[in-house]
């Protein structure tokens, strides 16, 4: 990737020996011909305002090339965040590619207690946001589709974590994740599968489906929150 090679050279030039590690994570991490949408983690020994200013120009170019804003942290932050970012670290450990420097990923140790706790927190936040859409009386089908896309994206992150809590394999396809996690959580599988197919497989809703799913999903999120809250590991 031309953009990645140039970005890495700029990071090494501006950070020098302070640059510890750069790696890709997420669904595009091991896609050889990925052109953009590549999530990067940048770890340094020290991280000052001057360091951030120094790499701000190449970071802007990287984001302009349709990539997400990189995550930047120092070594201390990396090792002290396994608890509060349990979901994110679990995702990184399962799918990453070292680009430069020290491979820090094998050092990741995620406690199931913190992983379950973050799943609960994410569900509470999701429920709050979803209820706000009803309070704001969203009537536009277009806007509601955006809401539903965001909901299923968040739920899939949580579902992957629930599978890891049960030491289960985590499939790649969204519909397969839903099928697997239905062994551990109760929800309307038809609704969840439809959401996934619209988001990831170019399916679409009928007007009747949209009306039904809006209400059914509220009940499902409330139920999922209770189920995750009741889990013990």
Image (tube, rainbow, N blue to C red):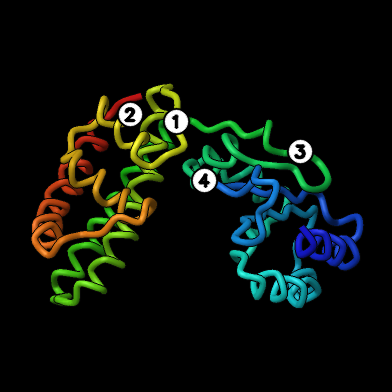
Q: Are marks 4 and 3 in contact (CB under 8 Å)?
A: no
Which mark, residue 38? none
Sooner in the amino-acid sequence: mark 1 or mark 2: 1
The Cα–Cα distance between marks 2 and 4, rounded to whole angstroms, is 20 Å
Residue at 76%, 60% (x, y): give it.
4
Viewer-side residue, 108 vs 206 = 206
Which mark, residue 170? 1
Quick one: label 4, few (<14), some, or many (20+) residues within 10 Å? some
Viewer-side residue, 175 vs 7 = 175
Quick one: label 1, few (<14), some, or many (20+) residues within 10 Å? some
Q: Are marks 1 and 2 in contact (CB under 8 Å)?
A: yes
The Cα–Cα distance between marks 2 and 3, rounded to whole angstroms, is 31 Å
Q: Is residue 70 left or right of residue 225?
A: right
Residue at 76%, 38% (x, y): give it.
103
The Cα–Cα distance between marks 1 and 3, rounded to whole angstroms, is 23 Å
Judging from the image, what secondary structure is the residue with disc 4 in?
Answer: helix
Sooner in the amino-acid sequence: mark 4 or mark 3: 4
Q: Position of residue 120 (x, y in %)?
A: 31, 44
Judging from the image, what secondary structure is the residue with disc 2 in?
Answer: helix
The Cα–Cα distance between marks 1 and 2, rounded to whole angstroms, is 8 Å
Viewer-side residue, 18 vs 223 = 223
- Which of labels 2 and 3 is toward the front? 2
Q: Which residue is mark 2?
A: 180
Judging from the image, what secondary structure is the residue with disc 3 in?
Answer: loop
Quick one: label 2, few (<14), some, or many (20+) residues within 10 Å? some
Sooner in the amino-acid sequence: mark 2 or mark 3: 3
Q: Is residue 84 left or right of residue 158?
A: right
């Amino acid at each position: 990737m031309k953009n990645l090679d140039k970005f890495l050279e700029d990071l090494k030039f501006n950070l020098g020996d302070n640059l510890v590690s750069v790696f890709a994570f997420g669904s595009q991490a091991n896609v050889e011909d990925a052109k953009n949408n590549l999530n990067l983690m940048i770890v340094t020994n020290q991280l000052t305002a001057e360091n951030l200013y120094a790499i701000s120009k190449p970071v802007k170019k990287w984001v302009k090339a349709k990539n997400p804003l990189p995550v930047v942290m120092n070594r201390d932050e990396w090792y002290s965040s396994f608890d509060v970012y349990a979901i994110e670290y679990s995702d990184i450990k399962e799918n990453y590619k070292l680009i430069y420097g020290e491979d820090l990923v094998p050092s990741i140790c995620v406690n199931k207690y913190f992983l379950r706790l973050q799943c609960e927190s994410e569900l509470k936040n999701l429920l709050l946001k979803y209820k706000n859409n009803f309070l704001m009386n969203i009537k536009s089908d277009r806007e509601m589709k955006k809401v539903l896309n965001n909901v299923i994206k968040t739920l899939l992150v949580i579902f992957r974590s629930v599978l890891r809590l049960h030491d289960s394999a985590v499939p790649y396809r969204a519909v397969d994740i839903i099928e697997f996690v239905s062994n551990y959580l109760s929800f309307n599988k038809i609704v969840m599968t439809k959401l996934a197919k619209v988001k990831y497989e170019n399916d679409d809703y009928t007007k009747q489906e949209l009306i039904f799913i809006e209400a059914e999903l509220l009940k499902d999120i409330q139920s999922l929150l209770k189920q995750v809250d009741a889990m013990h590991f």
